[in-house]
């Protein structure tokens, strides 16, 4: 299922001109406030007809300004979670949730009401009216409503912005399951939160002022030096692939990557499966000697590939660990004191607890 | 000084002409007789009142309205049966129900509109009332009854002769004998000294001519 | 027929006419209101002006126009007659007069209600796969229920009170077209008829107050449900 | 006075009366509408029913009630007279009749508009320090402007068209109290008056259509501003 | 300026009963979706009268259920940033922003329109109508509107939830300046984001299901083991106080704490001033030997005070460094391998770049 969009539209002084593909999996739209994220997602949903361009799903045109094609939103069957919840005020939560169910083709598969209410903690709220819900409760109901319409694609505009951390940690794996499960539901996902995107997204579209700044597989974009200022320095990092070997009784999982063995907490995958790990650049320390007696369990021999010094007090060090690449962000002073240079061999230290469970996907 | 006259609406054409001939300024306010009578009772700033029916004039007197002199009739009228302008003449009045066929007979409201009351009296006197009383189309004023006939909404209607005269779309089929209903008189009364003068003019022979020209019958003092 | 019985007969007929007028006019008014609120087309303002016209014209004039359009001799009236719909001198004509006289009130109430509905909710329904008709039925309609109710009550009240156009169009035929207002008017034209008129005014007032009270209670229920109380 | 001049005179008077009625009724209707929309008190439904009453009663009845209440011989009328306010048989009485007859329409339109305003916006204004009156003036009022406009247009149209209550209360004195509808009615009372009536109906229609067109254009401007177009 | 509140209210099945004081500075309300945060803030603003309790400001009652006192919202002069922006739809951005200005007493001091539009990036939007704004733009305008009413206290309900990281990083220091500047504006702040709260708050009120779970100075509550599950394990941490010694040319600041010297980037304070540093437990590593040749610049000798092992694979180690307390979160396996026990001396390693600038306050 591939969505392809080229959208040109002008709203007063704001000029949108973007083109991107969203393949299977989760495609994230990321950009600062006013970058045009909601406008794009509205165009994809068919809520307005852009000035020019086209939107196709698996090659079928949903919108084409030259061919004058326009498929109405109802026929697109994109479940849209709006930035504002937009619940129907005259329907209770249950009625809101099941609003779209009857319009789904009988063959459509999707979540059941029970699944969704459990996941989203809505069971106690089913008979409540939207006016009595808290901000987060509204947003959860809106997510459930979109899911229960059994859409062929989900459009989510900052769906988790008003939710607390624990609730987010429940919903994110569910979205991953939707993506990875038998439905293989593609999701177009807008968020300001880099950690959410880094965890969920397969494809990343970086937007700025109505233009695409970078677009591609998540890890390519996240490693793109040009993208770092847009993402924020604290969020830069690389990804490595590892195979799950075993789960120890103390909760740590033994994994093997091409660069060495790792012991990480919170990995759910079965032994034998491959997982991908996001390692934030700031979570990587470097040592010229092999460290001993350190509480960090994961030490990998690495080769420095590049030392990139910016304007600030920090430096980005590109590393190679086996076949994988790592990124470390350390201070310039440390670079000088340790005498780090290209092609030098040293050790990368990775705190086991500092790899958030959320950073482990697929 | 301006004379204000409250008058029944059916007198409008004639009164306007008389007012034009009157040396002073005249203001004419037309309405239904019942409405006008109540307005006078409520203190309307009228100098003269002219009604289309003696019942309401009697009522006014009963209310203790201050009237200068006695009310006096200024004109009279007769009742006619009308049909559309191409209607066959009626051989006898008893053919009326047959001529109605499935249609209705338009009259003013039998109790509320003076012309309707006179029409009812006529029909009662001629023994037709029971036959037609459920086949009536009663209107809120006699002009509406005329309009029903003129527009072909009903085949027959009973209106004043003065109305029939001016409407080219209708034709008089029968004249009601004056003995078959109460006298159709337009009683007038002066409420102020100023009104007294105008009342004089209303009863003058010139006024009588004008009334006659509009299809009324002049009242010989 | 005693005058008392006549008054009850007039009340019955007025209720009958008002109910029919309301039932028939609501969907039509809703449709026009929706068009005026949500569509943009050439002549929209003119349509709106046309809807307002019965307010401006003296009822007699509306009655005459109806007579000219739907009378026995008018082409439209004849056409309707031939398919079995009689309007002239028939209670259905009173219904037509009441519909037309109440139409501006109903359309305006419904239009204001529709304009107050956030189109974003309708968009949300569309993204959930609802076809147009379902969006209207499941989102717009329930949201404008108070406006429809308000329009219906105004239409009903106006239908109970309509007199001028009715009597001019269909005259005053007891049991057919003599509605309560006609009877009240007639009573007032007879010296000493006040008492009878007052009795009938009371009847009309009770009905109207009852209708308003019911509508207010219903509206309160709708509001309370939405507030979740 | 030629009948042509009389028609123009009637039009002038009707406009005068309708303008006064609209100007005077809008604030009052707004106040009642606000109470009905935002306050809860015992007898609220009854107040609403009372407001609707002029719709239900035949206009003649309203006219008679006014005559009985404000006539020269009535205590209230005399009291007002003594402080220089004459209503009966005066154009100001026509204004009063028009206000009362148009009141249900105005109140309903404004009430629907007020009910559509999100009280949360008024709360927001309160947290910004705005006193009640400023909240009303700077938030509620601009937001309900379309409803006020709608109510004003309906009230104006009704005032232009009011006949039954007016002619009963203030009679039909040319230049004083003879409004366009009264003049139209009077024209229809004599043979051959139809042409004159038609001319006056045209006048009334033009005015009404003009008023509606202006109000539609204004409402469109307000909507466009809010949409930011 | 001290706000004291005791609020009892029942909404259907939801039963709120909380009491807390909000002194000068920023008081954060934290709790999961539906915990009652918005309800509390509404009661403080005077948007409804709670069933029972009282709200006082500097001892003056704003609401008192027994004395039947109730000060209307307008007279409370609390600038409220709503969870939904609630801009006036009929006013453009400029008119929205200046709406409240005229009601402030002439003596009231506060931000100027220019300051606020610059800070919030609204300058280009001043003539726009709210309907044309993006979600984040609306929220920024709402913040500006509350500020420009020159309130005596700010109530902010998740004000930054819809903003992107860079924008947040601009606004947070501004809020700190409002608190610390001549205005000393107290702020009641609702947020789901622990990092925001940790950075801003002086006092923390932890809520759960309408009840206060913990309430007190931020660092006491954050160190409270009972609070850790509510805050989320990734956010636990301690605070140490340090004096700024000097700023080096490479951007690092030399600080001295009672436990030893630190070199941190991004510190703005003048030499000689004291700052407080939040050190996340997960950013602290332990080493039994003094580490050499490591890219982390900050090493402090510490004494283990307590080893707290939970259910999961992690353990919390309470440390003493001079007069300060630190918290470290490491794996249980590391505890075993290193043989960490109470009263043992070891070294705490703190990556310099891993102390976010936002963690440094006052
Ligand atoms: N009128 C009402 N009837 C019933 N329950 C209500 C009503 N109003 C609020 N509640 C409930 O009270 C609880 C607290 O609501 P509140 O808005 O204060 O939550 P919150 O902490 O702000 O949550 P969020 O972070 O999601 O905005 C919620 O569970 C909500 O469902
Ligand atoms: N009708 C309009 N007229 C003028 N400008 C508009 C209009 N609609 C949107 N814009 C502008 O287009 C830009 C993109 O808006 P959009 O809602 O897509 O932003 P966004 O990326 O979703 O931002 P946010 O994260 O704040 O929600 C914004 O700067 C907005 O002000
Ligand atoms: Mg957006
Ligand atoms: Mg909330």
Image (tube, coloured by chain):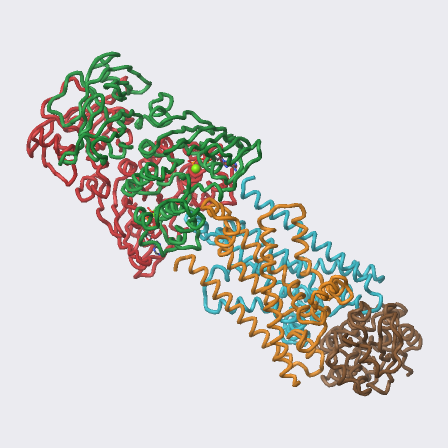
Chain colours: A green, B brown, C orange, D cyan, E red
Q: Residue E83 in the image: state x and y as whole percent.
A: 38, 45
Q: Residue E295, relative to residue C168: is it above or below?
A: above
Q: Residue E138 in the image: state x and y as whole percent.
A: 44, 40
User: Is A231 left or right of C71, judged from the image as shown?
Assistant: left
Tell me which corner region of the image, top left, top right, bottom left or bottom right, holds residue D163: bottom right
Compare residues C136 and A343 and report the one nearer the observer.
C136
Q: Residue E98 in the image: state x and y as whole percent.
A: 47, 41
One can see residue B118 in this view: yes
Compare residues D27 and B184 and report the one nearer the observer.
B184
| Image quarter of the N terminus of chain A | top left
Q: Residue A209 in the image: state x and y as whole percent.
A: 46, 29
One can see residue E79 in this view: no
User: Is E122 left or right of C104, judged from the image as shown?
Assistant: left
Q: Residue D18, relative to residue B221: is it above or below?
A: above
User: Is A208 left or right of B110, judged from the image as shown?
Assistant: left
| Image quarter of the C terminus of chain A | top left
């Amino acid at each position: 299922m591939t969505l392809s969009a080229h959208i040109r539209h002008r709203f007063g002084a704001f000029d949108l001109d973007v083109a991107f593909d969203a393949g299977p999996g989760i495609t994230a739209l990321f950009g600062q406030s006013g970058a045009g994220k909601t406008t794009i997602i509205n165009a994809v949903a068919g809520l307005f007809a852009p000035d020019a361009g086209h939107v196709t799903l698996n090659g079928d045109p949903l919108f084409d300004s030259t061919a004058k094609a326009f498929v109405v939103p109802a026929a697109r069957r994109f479940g849209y979670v709006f930035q504002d919840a937009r619940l129907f005020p005259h329907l209770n939560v249950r009625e809101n949730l099941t609003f779209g169910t009857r319009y789904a083709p009988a063959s459509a598969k999707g979540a059941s009401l029970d699944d969704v209410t459990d996941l989203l903690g809505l069971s106690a709220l089913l008979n409540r009216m939207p006016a009595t819900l808290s901000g987060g409760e509204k947003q959860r109901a809106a997510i459930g409503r979109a899911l229960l319409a059994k859409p062929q694609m989900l459009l989510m505009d900052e769906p988790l912005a008003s939710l607390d951390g624990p609730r987010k940690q429940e919903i994110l794996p569910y979205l991953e399951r939707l993506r990875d499960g038998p439905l293989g539901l593609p999701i177009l996902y807008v968020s300001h939160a880099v950690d959410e995107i880094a965890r969920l997204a397969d494809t990343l579209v970086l937007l700025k002022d109505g233009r695409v700044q970078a677009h591609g597989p998540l890890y390519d974009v996240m490693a793109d030096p040009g993208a770092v200022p847009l993402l924020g320095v604290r969020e830069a990092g690389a990804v490595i692939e590892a195979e799950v070997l075993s789960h120890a009784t103390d909760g740590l999982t033994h994994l093997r990557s091409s660069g060495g063995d790792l012991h990480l907490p919170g990995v759910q995958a079965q032994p034998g499966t491959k997982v991908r790990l996001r390692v934030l650049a700031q979570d990587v320390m470097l040592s010229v000697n092999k460290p001993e007696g350190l509480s960090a369990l994961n030490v990998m021999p690495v080769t420095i590939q590049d030392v990139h010094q910016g304007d600030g007090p920090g430096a980005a060090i590109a590393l190679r660990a086996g076949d994988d690449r790592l990124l470390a962000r350390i201070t310039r002073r440390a670079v000088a004191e340790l005498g780090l240079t290209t092609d030098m061999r040293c050790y990368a230290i990775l705190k086991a607890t500092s790899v958030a469970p959320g950073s482990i996907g697929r | 000084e301006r004379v204000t006259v409250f008058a029944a609406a059916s007198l409008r054409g004639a009164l306007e002409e008389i007012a034009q001939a009157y040396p002073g300024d005249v203001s004419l306010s037309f309405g239904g007789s019942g409405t006008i009578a109540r307005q006078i009772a409520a203190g309307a700033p009228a100098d003269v009142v002219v009604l289309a029916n003696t019942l309401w004039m009697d009522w006014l007197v009963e209310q203790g309205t201050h009237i200068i002199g006695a009310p006096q009739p200024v004109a009279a009228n007769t009742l006619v049966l009308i049909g559309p302008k191409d209607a066959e003449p009626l051989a006898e009045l008893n053919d009326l129900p047959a001529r109605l066929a499935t249609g209705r007979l338009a009259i003013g409201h039998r109790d509320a509109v003076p012309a309707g009351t006179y029409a009812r009296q006529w029909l009662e006197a001629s023994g037709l009332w029971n036959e037609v009383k459920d086949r009536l189309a009663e209107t809120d004023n006699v002009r509406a009854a005329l309009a029903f006939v003129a527009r072909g909404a009903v085949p027959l209607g009973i209106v004043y002769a003065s109305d029939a005269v001016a409407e080219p779309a209708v034709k008089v089929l029968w004249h009601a004998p004056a003995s078959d209903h109460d006298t159709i008189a337009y009683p007038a009364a002066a409420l102020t000294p100023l009104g007294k003068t105008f009342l004089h003019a209303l009863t003058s022979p010139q006024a009588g001519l004008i009334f006659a020209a509009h299809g009324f019958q002049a009242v010989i003092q | 027929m005693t005058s008392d019985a006549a008054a009850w007969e007039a009340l019955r007929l007025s209720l009958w006419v008002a109910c029919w007028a309301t039932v028939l006019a609501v969907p039509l008014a809703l449709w026009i209101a929706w068009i005026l609120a949500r569509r943009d087309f050439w002549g929209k303002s003119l349509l709106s002006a046309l809807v307002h016209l019965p307010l401006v014209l003296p009822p007699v004039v509306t009655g005459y126009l109806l007579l000219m359009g739907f009378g026995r001799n008018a082409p439209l009236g004849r056409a309707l007659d031939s398919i079995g719909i009689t309007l002239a001198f028939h209670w259905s004509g009173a219904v037509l007069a009441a519909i037309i006289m109440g139409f501006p009130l109903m359309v305006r109430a419904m239009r204001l209600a529709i304009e107050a509905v956030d189109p974003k909710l309708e968009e949300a329904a569309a993204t959930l796969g609802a076809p147009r008709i379902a969006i209207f039925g499941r989102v717009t309609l329930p949201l404008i229920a108070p406006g429809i109710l308000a329009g219906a009550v105004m239409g009903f009240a106006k239908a109970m009170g309509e007199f001028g156009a009715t009597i001019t169009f269909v005259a005053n035929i007891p049991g057919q077209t003599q509605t309560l207002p006609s009877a009240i008017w007639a009573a007032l034209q007879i010296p000493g008829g006040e008492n009878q008129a007052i009795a009938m005014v009371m009847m009309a007032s009770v009905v109207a107050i009852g209708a308003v009270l019911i509508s207010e209670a219903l509206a309160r229920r709708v509001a309370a449900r939405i507030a979740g109380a």
